[in-house]
Image: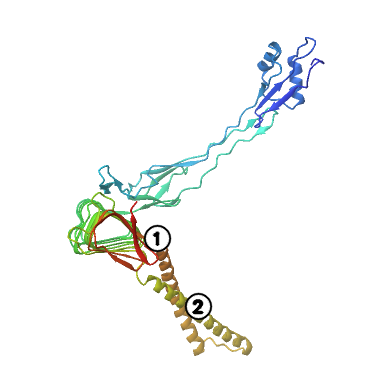
């Protein structure tokens, strides 16, 4: 390299060490650099891989001075791809009915059941793609991200291929995701009506009726119940959701009960118990106990007559009618619920104290055995203590379970309100957390809520 340079050459590396830039100053005495001199500068700075000969040649021939020129380029690593599952079914279902443009509710849009057949492919596993390491301009290895393998799918009702790549259903039924598990459950499916010819149904799984359910029929399912037609005066009991696309004409002889949620076109003269939410267009002369929220959002949605209880509150279009039909709406915690929770809390404390005393008594018998060397196993007094302990432990478990359930319901009920998006008529009585108000005058777009032991109103939003 020429001796007469203004400043020392500068070699700069990119942060990932995949590129090297060389900047040299203008040489003095009309001397020029040679490619070998430039390579020597790079070598002195540790750059020895991916040197761009054409770039060095351009620097020499075109006299590219006083500017950084990329003179080396490494090989970038290629990251691997994690293994993944491709599901051949909809793994996330939307159980909420959709509102049509005209304001009505489309209960056919509720996607609760995805049927599968034995032998149907339900999932395909794509193994990880391993990455390829790169090389930096200093010759160092730049490690690529490794593709991670995924664990085998868990669940029931399906089989794996020998290479663990393809999963197929082993039974006919319904497929659903339960956390990180795939579960295929049996379905009892009736292509027509559920009537006297089909008889009552008691099934461990899901029940689907593609027709109507006629008078007097009882359907029990540990899973969900879906009816495409109309339900008459019947009994429906489910462990999961109930979907009635055509509604229910109860005739004062019907009952619907579920631990899940309910979606229905309408209910008339029906007793309803639901742990989740209840969504429908119309509730007419029904008795409802809902531990979640009642939502009636169609453009004709209304509650007319009956007694409606909803822990988390009510949202509807109308309540009551011009005839001032008596309609009772209860929101929030039911009357006596807090009192019962307080009683249980005291009872649980007392029972625990009694069990502690019994344990001390049993310990005393054990100490006597060790002291005197005599067995007290069959002593009537010790046997009596054991019987009382068994009774009290069982009673304590029941009380604690009830107390826990009450606490959850009280938590749910906080802030409950009754929201009316259109009209509420005289004849309606609103009860929120034990406070009551009778509607004397027709009102629109109003929300009832409790504040400082008084039911107040505000515009519904």
Which quarter of the rendering shows the N terminus?
top right
Please name whichever residue, 232 or 278, is drawn nearer the observer in this view of the structure: 278
Structural crowding at the residue carrying mark 1, measured as other residues with C-alpha within 10 Å and reported as few (<14), some (14–19) or many (≥20) = some
Asked if the residue under mark 1 is in contact with the one under mark 2, i.e. CB atoms within 8 Å, the reply is no
Please name whichever residue, 448 or 319, is drawn nearer the observer in this view of the structure: 448
Say above or below: 128 vs 38. below
**Considering the numbered disc 1 on the image, is that residue within a helix, a strand or a loop?**
loop
Q: Residue 119 at what x, y percent from top left?
A: 35, 45
Find the distance from the CA under tag 2 to the CA under tag 1.
33 Å
Please name whichever residue, 28 or 97, is drawn nearer the observer in this view of the structure: 28
Whether residue 262 is visible to the viewer of this picture, yes or no, is no
Please report the residue visible at 59 percent of the width from the left and 38 percent of the height from the top: 145
Say above or below: 153 vs 440. above
Q: Residue 384 at what x, y percent from top left?
A: 48, 86
Task: Classify residue 352 as left or right of residue 228.
Answer: right
Say above or below: 411 vs 246. below
Task: Name the residue carrying label 1.
Answer: 415
Instruction: Please tell me in which quadrant of the rendered image residue 131 appears.
Output: top right
Please report the residue visible at 48 percent of the width from the left and 47 percent of the height from the top: 152
Task: Name the residue carrying label 2.
Answer: 352
Q: How many marks?
A: 2
Mark 2 / mark 1, whichever is N-terminal: 2
Task: Classify residue 183 as left or right of residue 196.
Answer: right
Whether residue 8 is visible to the viewer of this picture, yes or no, is yes
Say above or below: 210 vs 361. above
Task: Classify residue 218 as left or right of residue 167.
Answer: left
Please report the residue visible at 35 percent of the width from the left and 48 percent of the height from the top: 94
Q: Residue 20 at what x, y percent from top left?
A: 68, 25
Please report the residue visible at 61 percent of the width from the left and 29 percent of the height from the top: 76
């Amino acid at each position: 390299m020429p001796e007469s340079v203004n400043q020392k050459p500068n070699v700069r590396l990119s942060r990932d060490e995949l590129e090297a830039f060389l900047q040299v100053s203008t040489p003095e005495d009309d001397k020029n650099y040679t490619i070998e001199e430039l390579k020597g500068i790079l070598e002195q700075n540790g750059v020895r891989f991916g040197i761009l000969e054409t770039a060095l040649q351009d620097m020499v021939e075109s006299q590219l001075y006083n500017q950084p020129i990329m003179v080396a380029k490494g090989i970038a690593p290629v990251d691997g791809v994690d293994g993944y599952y491709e599901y051949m079914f909809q793994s996330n279902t939307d159980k909420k009915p959709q509102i049509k443009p005209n304001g009505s509710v489309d209960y056919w849009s509720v996607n609760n059941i995805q049927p599968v057949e034995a032998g149907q492919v339900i999932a395909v596993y794509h193994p990880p793609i391993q990455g390829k390491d790169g090389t930096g301009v200093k010759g160092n290895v730049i490690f690529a991200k490794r593709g991670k393998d995924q664990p085998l799918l868990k669940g029931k009702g399906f089989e794996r291929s020998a290479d663990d790549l393809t999963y197929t259903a082993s039974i006919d039924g319904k497929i659903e995701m339960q956390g990180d598990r795939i579960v295929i459950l049996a379905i009892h499916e009736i292509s027509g009506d559920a009537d006297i010819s089909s008889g009552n149904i008691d099934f461990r799984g899901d029940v689907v009726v593609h027709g109507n359910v006629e008078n007097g029929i009882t359907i029990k399912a540990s899973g969900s119940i879906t009816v495409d037609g109309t339900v008459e005066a019947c009994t429906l009991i489910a462990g999961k959701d109930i979907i009635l696309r055509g509604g229910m004409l109860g005739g004062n002889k019907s009952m619907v009960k579920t631990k899940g949620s309910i979606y229905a076109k309408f209910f008339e003269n029906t007793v309803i118990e639901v742990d989740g939410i209840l969504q429908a267009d119309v509730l007419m002369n029904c008795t409802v106990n809902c531990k979640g929220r009642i939502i009636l959002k169609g453009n004709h949605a209304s509650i007319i007559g009956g007694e409606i209880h909803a822990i988390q509150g009510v949202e509807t279009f109308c309540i009551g009618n011009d005839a001032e039909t008596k309609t009772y709406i209860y929101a929030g915690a039911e009357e006596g619920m807090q009192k019962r929770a307080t009683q249980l809390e005291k009872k649980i404390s007392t029972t625990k104290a009694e069990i502690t005393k019994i344990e001390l008594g049993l310990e005393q018998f054990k100490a006597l055995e060790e002291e005197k060397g005599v067995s007290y196993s069959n002593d009537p007094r010790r046997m009596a203590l054991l019987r009382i302990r068994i009774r009290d432990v069982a009673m304590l478990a029941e009380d604690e379970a009830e107390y826990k359930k009450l606490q959850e319901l009280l938590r749910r009920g906080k802030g409950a309100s009754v929201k009316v998006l259109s009209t509420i008529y005289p004849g309606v009585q609103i009860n929120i957390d034990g406070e009551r108000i009778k509607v004397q005058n027709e009102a629109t777009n109003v929300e009832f809520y409790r504040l400082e032991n008084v039911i107040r109103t505000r515009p519904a939003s």
